[in-house]
Image: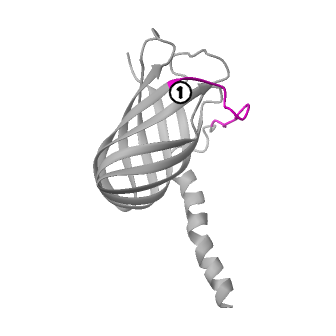
Amino acid sequence: MKKTIAVALAALPVAFVATAASAADVISRRDSVPTYQENDQRGGVRIGYLDCSIGGGVGYVLGSAKEADCVFKSTMGSEPLDRYTGVVRKMGVDLGFTTRSRLIWAVFAPTAGYHHGSLGGLYQGATAEATVGAGIGANILVGGTSGSIHLQTVSVTGQLGLNLAATGTSVTLSPAAM
């Protein structure tokens, strides 16, 4: 009996994070949510990096929302930079504050091509972070457009502040106005 209760209690946080990931973004379910498809084990050709600066803020115990400014940097050399704006939303245990964060994702495509705005979309998953002064976090996010260009599923965040978080997370990216 005690083992059954212990197993049930241990499963609750996992179920909470799984449902919180879909609740972390306030997008109408009437809008179609893009699907993520990985074509092969290697995920295609790495065509660049998406470097995001995430604004500081306070975790309100059950979640937070922070602005993000991102730049796509191509590994192709003379390709122009592509800018994105967005919001990082977290739903779950998010205690403390951060002054700023930086998130870098590798960008993959089946071929070496890239078009302006290709990374716009909704990415959802889970985040775990620990910060005392300087800290790190890990993100597992999938999504984006229904096209073939996608972000590396696992990414790392560096941040400054005092924070502890285990949340369902969504990142919404839109091409920035030129």
- For this orientation, the residue located farthest to the bottom is 1
41 in magenta: yes
What amino acid is labelled 1 in the image? Leu
The quarter in which the N terminus is drawn is bottom right
Horizontal arrangement in the rendering, residue 141 relative to residue 54 (left or right): right
- For this orientation, the residue located farthest to the top is 78
Which region is colored magenta?
Answer: 34-48
Viewer-proximal residue, 117 or 166? 166
Instruction: Name the image quarter holding residue 47.
Output: top right
Residue 60 in the image, given as x and y percentages of width and height: 34, 60
37 in magenta: yes
Residue drawn at point x = 41 percent, y = 40 percent = 87
Q: Is residue 97 above or below residue 31?
A: below
Residue 127 in the image, given as x and y percentages of width and height: 49, 52
Residue 69 in the image, given as x and y percentages of width and height: 36, 32
Horizontal arrangement in the rendering, residue 82 relative to residue 28 (left or right): left
Regarding residue 116, the answer to whether it shows in the image is yes
The quarter in which the C terminus is drawn is top left
Residue 53 in the image, given as x and y percentages of width and height: 35, 35
Regarding residue 25, the answer to whether it shows in the image is no
Q: Is residue 172 above or below residue 116?
A: below
Residue drawn at point x = 58 percent, y = 40 percent = 153
Q: Main secondary structure of the magenta part?
A: loop
| Mark 1 residue element | loop
Viewer-proximal residue, 91 or 162? 162
Q: Which residue is mark 1?
A: 119
